[in-house]
Amino acid sequence: MNTPVVVTGLGVVSPNGLGAADYWAATLVGKSGLSRITRFDPSQYPARLAGEIHGFAAEEHLPSRLLPQTDRMTRLALVAADWALADAGVSTAERPAFEMGVITASASGGFEFGQNELRKLWSRGGQYVSAYQSFAWFYAVNSGQISIRHGLKGPSGVVVSDQAGGLDAVAQARRQIRKGTPLIVSGGVDASLCPWGWVAQTAGGRLSTSDEPSRAYLPFDSAARGHVPGEGGAILIMEDLAAARARGARVYGEVAGYGATFDPRPGSGRAPGLRKAIELALADADTGPAAVDLVFADAAALPELDRSEAAALCAVFGARGVPVTAPKTMTGRLYSGAAPLDLATAFLAMREGIIPPTVNVEAAAEHRLDLVTRQTRDAELRTVLVLARGHGGFNSAMVLRSARDTDPPVANERKTHVR
């Protein structure tokens, strides 16, 4: 029998809230973090809006020695990891180092690091520095910095599959826990709001060019014309259920099922792979479509991709067969950080019995979705499905189960402050 793996701590850094409590409060009232970019002058670019994190001062949370070694993405990830460990009530200094590991996701956040390396290259008068070496080092540094900071010497890794990577990293963490590592720090944080990163993102042709924050990112709306990028994400503390029980941990819920597929090549005539990923995740969780109480959509906000996601949901659950939400309309698409933030939101939603809204959207009738818009909806949430798709054909699906449905039951008496 597979070991149940649960989440015991959350650390959130998002455009509409720093810390899980602030983020959750903002999400429930529909507070958006989308606005015109301020980190650089976007006037020369076709897309000018983003989900920026304001009010984050790394020097208030991290030792000064770390600041020269890290970029914005790594600083956000380090602070989110600190908050997640504190929320879980875990003191890493009191645990064996090889019984803890770090597996995170990364996709677009290396742009700022790469841009800084190019500046160093120019300042050195042409001294050769390999961009590929720089990015390879960067993808390791995020999880590596977390490992070093907290003395985690167990399994470590970085998953790179664009927006799907956040779920893929959590799934890999679950595998490592089932192999015997009691605790893994997982999730993902991305940050690519720099000129070089912006050029790369606009070249993809998927960004909204609207200058009106409330009309820029509209998944499943007839006016959908692309997404708004953002920075941030969530770090999760994942544990073996028995180990969590033994220390009296408060549990948010279980990572119960996972499925991943890859889309066929364009023009092949074969169906996209998202439906199969959902079915694989449900089978892995040993549950059926009728048990799912809520779906967190990938929400690409491109007509063709919205249609394919809606078609997959209708094929599995039936037309308007399950409530669907996409609170990322308040944060933008956070790339590797998006799905971990959806996981954190799902656990908070299950705890509170509240479905957060998809703001600013009028769901197009053609999609036949029960999209939760405008305001929250009360609901008993015991099983939640989270979807994520990455550019290039990645599809991932994850089934979460509420803490009260974990088997055997987990003691939930210990209360910790959610930062």
Image (cartoon, rainbow, N blue to C red):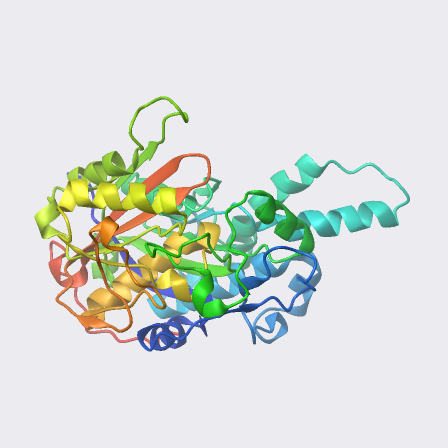
Q: In this view, does 2 lie above or below 82?
A: above
Residue 377: % across, % down: 20, 71
Q: Is residue 370 above or below residue 271?
A: below
Residue 13: % across, % down: 47, 66
Q: Can residue 174 be seen in this view?
A: no
Quarter of the figure with the N terminus: top left
Residue at position x 63%, y 69% from top?
Answer: 63
Residue 363: % across, % down: 28, 59
Residue at position x 38%, y 76% from top?
Answer: 26
Q: Can residue 383 be seen in this view?
A: yes
Residue at position x 46%, y 50% from top?
Answer: 336
Quarter of the figure with the C terminus: bottom left
Residue 12: % across, % down: 42, 66
Residue 138: quadrant of the picture: top right
Residue 19: quadrant of the picture: bottom left
Q: Is residue 3 left or right of residue 67?
A: left
Closer-to-camera residue (151/11)? 11
Closer-to-camera residue (100/167)? 167
